[in-house]
Amino acid sequence: MSHVMNTYARLPVAFSHGNGSRVIDTEGRMYLDGLAGIAVNTLGHNHPALVAAISAQAGRLLHTSNIYRMPQQEQLADKLAELSGMDEVFFCNSGCEANEAAIKLARFYGHQRGVDNPAIIVMEHSFHGRTLATLSATGSRKVQAGFEPLVAGFVRAPFGDLDAVRAIGERNKNVVAVMFEVVQGEGGIHVADPAYQRGLRGLCDENAWLMICDEVQCGTGRTGTWFGFQQAGIRPDVATLAKGLAGGVPIGACLAAGKAAWLLKPGNHGSTFGGNPLATTAALTTLEVIEKENLLANAVSVGEIIRNGLAQALADLPGGAGIRGMGLMIGIELDRPCGELVERALDAGLLINVTAERVVRLLPALNFSAEEGRELVERLSALIRAFLSS
């Protein structure tokens, strides 16, 4: 029996190595990877540029601590500011840490404005992490159950309902920020309408609230732009990144702009490992490859191939298939719980995921080819058809 804590319902497979969007298990069997480590392996597996950069950096320095300057960290912050239009960046190790930094920043901002008990409006069906504060912000009782008392200071609104956010603000004068995902990943691949995002931006401006965009899963080019919020033509006050930023090496980032920027000073926040030379080198290389290989455009074109292909292949199913998403972040909602599809797909040599009980989630690497997209459609549609008819 393994001594690893039993916090995951693991599938009966272990992988040995991979190349691109193909992975091989310890028995020598090959799989098409439609999940990319849950939106982490941005460049697929074993990308030569990323492997070379990580290897070279490991031979120089792995870690020095944030007591000292780190050129790679500064270069990455400059690059992210250039790509996003934001002003400053705090580095950590994961999405929940990035969101913790955003929550702390919002509370700090509120106290600076004289609000003793700052509140943040968050959305139903959201997912922001598993630390106590981020699971309290999350709109899922499944995640929260058993960990009460939850952290106070979060007020929930229906996702996509601008009037509900406005009404909360009118009733609760402690509100200092609104926090939402541009695409709800764990919640079932629900996309925030651009008009809704612009409306939130307007409400935040009218009330001097911070607008916080959680792009932990949908950021770093997955939607076809560097940041999902860019497709709505807005700039938030705070944005968070993690997952795919370093192509598989743990990193998180909290970006701030405008009235949220330059608030935190030495001692207000920190991270032992955050932004170390290895992680920031991996992130810089990942961003460089995305640009060099034109992977933003690839995410758009291959995402369209997959969505359109699935819509055509599943159009006549009585059980239905609601297909939605942006770029290479795709959900197929069925009319019944479909968790067993994950293991069926594994048996068929395909890696997928199911979230929100009924939504097949696809998060391929950004360099997933058009041919692989068509293969994914063919294999997955056959599995879904067989499942719905069983």
Image (cartoon, rainbow, N blue to C red):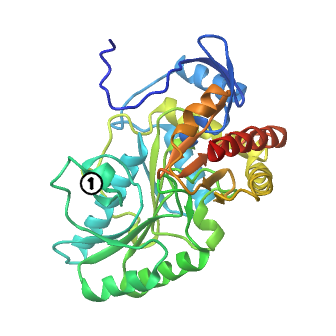
Q: Residues within 10 Å of mark 1 (few under 14, many from 20)?
A: many
Residue 221: percent from the left, percent from the top? Answer: 65, 52
Above or below residue 226? Residue 108 is below
Q: Residue at x 62, y 26 (%)?
A: 347
> Percent from the top left, x then y, of residue 47?
70, 28
Left/right placement of residue 339 relative to residue 93 reads right
Image coords of residue 137 (percent x, y): 32, 60
Q: Is residue 246 visible?
A: no
Q: In which quadrant of the rendered view does residue 6 lie?
A: top left
| Disc 1: which residue | 133
Provide the secondary structure element on which disc 1 rests: helix
Q: Amino acid at mark 1?
A: Ala
Q: State which quadrant residue 260 falls in.
A: bottom left
User: Which x, y percent locates residue 24?
Assistant: 65, 18
Q: Tell me what residue is drawn at x 59 percent, y 80 percent.
A: 195
Taking the image as drawn, is residue 332 in sight?
A: yes
Residue at 68 percent of width and 39 percent of height: 383
Q: Does residue 57 lie above or below 196 as drawn?
A: above
In which quadrant of the rendered view does residue 28 lie? top right
Q: Nearer the viewer, residue 314 or 275?
A: 314
Front residue (pair 257, 186): 186
